[in-house]
Amino acid sequence: MKKTLVAALALAALAVNFAMAAKKQGKVLNIYCWNEEFQSRFNDYYASKLPSDIKVNWVITPNQGGAYQDKLDEALLRQKKAKADDKVDIFLVEADYALKYVDTSYTLNVKKDVGLTDADLAQQYKYTKDIMTDSKGNLKGVSWQACPGGFIYRRSIAKDVLGTDDPVEVGKALSNWDKFDDVAAKAKAKGYFMVSGFDDDFRVFSDNVKTPWVDKKTSKIQIDPQIRRWIKQTKEYTDKGYNNKANLWSPESFQGAAKSGKVFGYFGPAWFIDFCLAPATLDNPNGAKAVGNGSYGDWAFCKGPQGFSWGGTWICGAAGSDNIDLIKDIMKTLTCDANTMVKIAKEAGDFTNNEKAMAQVANSSYQNPFLGGQNHMAFFLDSAKSIDKSTMSAYDQTMNETIQSAMADYFNGKVTEAQAWDNFYMSVIEKHPNLKK
């Protein structure tokens, strides 16, 4: 009897040891991403909670040309054989290619594997969870931000063209595309460009499509009327001089936002406002973000002619990570904690992924200094609840990048529209031979 009891206790102790070994956390946290946006959120709103013996290794690879995905894919393919300290722990994905990783074994189940609960996730906007839910109903990633967008316009130009810079009044003047076109003509007459270039409003149209880029049954490429409408409008704007022929993200595009710039406005969500546009308005990049430094503060926000969303970044836990507890705490702090969500919104300008927190900020005395003291969060509230991503596909990044690139030659008069379409199809099918025209 004693021997049996001793043996049982020994087995129990061994089981505990195995459990403790399995539970033991790694000392290196490897995070894969494509720019410094998440790194800044992590450093500002989580790093102080990080255990002192944990080293964070940032593996940052630019998104352009699929470089980030290539780097990430290589790491995930060798995940099983990699040493513990070399394994991917966390990786970030964007909306355009999130589905590529959602329905795979490379992503941890946020609830079952990581340990977040329905109560933790209750205040997150539904679409941010829908995007990261696999075909079996498992949530595979979470985000700290929701990304409804609008029109960010130059106050001084609005006053010159419309006689007012008030967001409500400007919003009325730009409340549909016919009105937007009329204002574009007025702006041109005053020496301004309505938008900076070819791609400024692409996401407004592409986010309102009713059909996905690819038919699942036939693998046939589909062109939604919204995409054709963007092409038609952009060609007209180019020929009439309503834009300055800039490509999105180019220096020429952002130069239009400088103090001497002539661009009426840019389309974008909250992350675009403070993370991308605001820095481009500064005459002195190293100077204070304040009125007097370039055109900073001479901006405001309204909904614009059509509601839309753009982008978003999701945090995924990598299968095989030895830092599950840390991943859980990072996800919970940065995407579920209402106090953190409010802080990020007020300090970093993000429209964060928490309904109660955003309602609190929208009804507070919060002021965005870049937007001339405007509390623009209220403009996002209804849009965020109505975002629908049911037309998303795993091909979105390829399609969105290729259509913009192919049509730029048409807008510039280098090729006919028919030739631009041929170049689009050829490029897409070269990347995805399974698709057809």
Image (cartoon, rainbow, N blue to C red):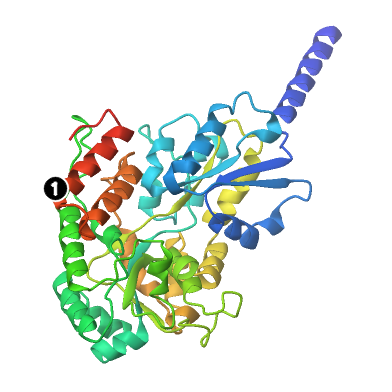
Residue type for callout 1: Ala
Q: Quadrant of residue 49?
A: bottom right
Q: In which quarter of the image is the N terminus?
A: top right
Residue at x 21% of width, y 55% of height = 410
Residue at x 33% of width, y 75% of height = 265
Q: In which quarter of the image is the C terminus?
A: top left
Residue situated in front as seen by the camera: 318 or 130:
318
Residue, disc 1: 418
Residue situated in front as seen by the camera: 177 or 285:
285
- Is residue 207 among the parts visible in the rendering? no
Q: Of helix, strand and loop, which one carries label 1?
A: helix
Q: In this view, does 165 lie above or below 333?
A: below
Taking 437 as reference, is 120 left or right? right
Residue at x 52% of width, y 68% of height = 342
Q: Is residue 26 above or below residue 362?
A: above
Picture coordinates of residue 29 (x, y %)?
Answer: 67, 43
